[in-house]
Amino acid sequence: MNFELLARDGRARRGRLGLVRGAVETPAFMPVGTYGTVKAMTPEELKGLGAQIVLGNTFHLMLRPGPEVIAAHGGLHRFMNWPGPILTDSGGFQVWSLAELRKLTEEGVRFRSPVNGDPVLLTPESSIAVQTALDADIVMVFDECTPYPASEPVARNSMELSARWAARSRVEFDRLGNANALFGIVQGGLDPELRGASTRFIAALPCDGICIGGLAGDETPEQRDAALDVAVPLLADDPRPRYLMGLGSPADLLEAVHRGVDLFDSVLPARVARNGQLWIPGGRLNLRNRAFLDDAAPVQEDCPCLLCRRYSRAYLAHLFRAKELLAYRLATCHNLTFTLDFMARIRASIRAGTFPADMTDLRSRAGRVSGGEVAEQSA
Amino acid sequence: MNFELLARDGRARRGRLGLVRGAVETPAFMPVGTYGTVKAMTPEELKGLGAQIVLGNTFHLMLRPGPEVIAAHGGLHRFMNWPGPILTDSGGFQVWSLAELRKLTEEGVRFRSPVNGDPVLLTPESSIAVQTALDADIVMVFDECTPYPASEPVARNSMELSARWAARSRVEFDRLGNANALFGIVQGGLDPELRGASTRFIAALPCDGICIGGLAGDETPEQRDAALDVAVPLLADDPRPRYLMGLGSPADLLEAVHRGVDLFDSVLPARVARNGQLWIPGGRLNLRNRAFLDDAAPVQEDCPCLLCRRYSRAYLAHLFRAKELLAYRLATCHNLTFTLDFMARIRASIRAGTFPADMTDLRSRAGRVSGGEVAEQSA
């Protein structure tokens, strides 16, 4: 893997991530394929929308269908028919989400499989082994997500555990002879001192990219910005790509790019699409609203996606009412198109050197409000 | 509409239905788009699989989104983005399925909408009006489905009511100036005398095609064959296309073509696909079977569909276990490909004049057993 910086505009960066299976123009958004499929979409469609890399979930794929099945197919790419780059998470976030159903020790996390109740032990070593079996182009170190809110001692212990797990992940990655890329993960919660200490530790770890973790949860946008304002300056001269896990609303993506982040992933655009929320410039449409049932206009006039080129709001609203499978597919297609197009606009703006001036227009297109909430528009 | 007979082989016929929106090579199978969408598929995909015409359900579309919404889009074709021919049923079968929730009179059928509880009256006139608003290329007369089993007086009354409704449908079709095609529907249950009387009545009705109704329900294949053996000979010199509503298993389609039927529709291939039943030459695979979870072979070796070209049985079995939307789409794609390809083989065989000799091979490919049940194969 190599990462080439093509342009800078303030803290924002325009780059190119070179991977064996393809290049990723950054800042980039990665659609999430939890179970080896971006819900409702084919890989051919994703590529057509401009997706350059997708994310797979180690936790979910480890439990179902299991790494041995995927390895027998020659890796996740062939299993899911996506020949481009894949980044896998470490499973740390999902085991953290199990809350009291998990038991945390220095060794790792013990829990019962939500699929079949079997006892499972996930450690830095087993996480790296699974990601190696999946043949992920970018592997993440195993980390512990710091709860929010957290007292200083809790946040410190968590951050220090993640640091030790990151080091163990690195050792196991090398021991397995994995030739792909490995990213470290900065934790430290919202405490500037801990966030800074974690950033310095991970920056010192020999790895190919730096993930800024624990920042797409329940914190406010201001708290998130503050944490980025601690971490990114410490990495100012670091040539490696920076990845913020779990951000997905256009407004959030924009602000994080503005603060120097290069890579993103989130289920948000697809999840809200399946619920009838369609993103358009300046806001969103809720297609479950009765007002759309006789609206013959397209969801977004100038959008090149399959939904907007071929179908009306009335048709999509009807499909949602009838719980037709095509609704989820067309809506997902649109929101991913909107998100990937938004990232392309950001990239063009940074490359042109007009990013600060373009922020007003980009914020307006994103619907301004962050945290996944954008202004709802009527029919 | 015109119907050209290109070849005959025994009773089997190879024809071409000429419609303003496109030709339909017969014998033909029509995928069903109940709510203005063939579940999980786009029209572009359907066309790619070889679908020439699709069916829309008057009853469902009348209740949701309503004929006025579809008419405001310029008809069902533009609403659902299928530019090819569409046949609509009359709603008779669906109101019959409501059983004790409907009230039948000479005028029509009163029932409460299953969608919102509103009282609805469906008559020959209102059915034709809805189908006209949808701009169906082929409109069906409104009929009453004869229950099975039925006593002679019940079957006779039902058949005679359907005959009067067919005549009223014809009058309303003309009164509305509908320039598309109208098909009559033969009823009469399993009684040879009533089936014959109904056939003669409908054959005498000025209409563009003849549907043989009430034969894809709970009767045995032998009873169905016997009813066809009454109706088809009475239509031997009739140049109009013959349509058997509701048949869908390859074995059933084959036997009905053998007895002189030209057109078919059914939800069966798509419905069983969504349940994990994949049709292959000689039988079927149940992808919910654990045995497929590590089977890296394609569902069907020589199949050109998206599923078989790109994915393994293990991947599809995994998608079904994870309840992923892509499972329903890929499985539907395959079963419709299998069914449409099977019809193309039948057409080629009739055209070549080798149909009787090919029946053994075709029965073997269909999995022999009729009634939707074919031999299940293991991994």
Image (cartoon, coloured by chain):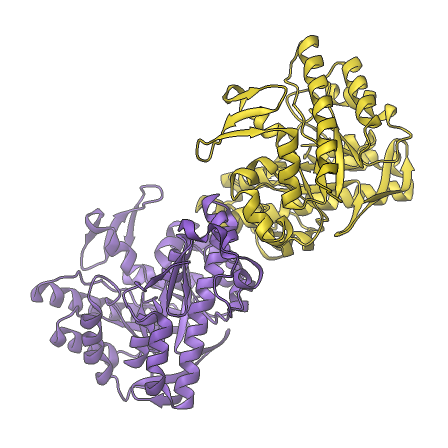
Chain colours: A yellow, B purple
Q: Can you give x and y, in whole percent of width and height, for residue B110 in the image?
A: 24, 51
Q: Residue at x 19, y 72 (%)?
A: B222
In terms of image quadrants, where is residue A148? top right
Is residue A254 toward the left or the right of residue A121 in the image? right
Q: Can you give x and y, in whole percent of width and height, for residue B315 in the image?
A: 52, 52
Q: Residue at x 70, y 52 (%)?
A: A84
Quarter holding the N terminus of chain B? bottom left
Q: Can you give x and y, in whole percent of width and height, for residue A232 in the image?
A: 84, 26
Q: Residue at x 53, y 63 (%)?
A: B308
Q: Nearer the viewer, residue B157 or A68?
A: A68
Q: Nearer the viewer, residue A129 or A269?
A: A129
Is residue A14 toward the left or the right of residue A75 in the image? right
Q: Up-down: is A10 above or below A343?
A: above
Q: Is residue A262 visible?
A: yes
Q: Nearer the viewer, residue A271 or A323?
A: A271
Q: Up-down: is B359 above or below A57?
A: below
In terms of image quadrants, where is residue B9? bottom left
Is residue A42 toward the left or the right of residue A163 in the image? left
Q: Up-down: is A264 above or below B27?
A: above
In terms of image quadrants, where is residue B105? bottom left
Question: Total label count?
Answer: 0
Is residue A311 toward the left or the right of residue B262 in the image? right
Q: Up-down: is A160 above or below A251?
A: above
Q: Is residue A313 visible?
A: no
Q: Residue at x 67, y 50 (%)?
A: A301
Q: Can you give x and y, in whole percent of width and height, for residue B29 in the image?
A: 40, 71
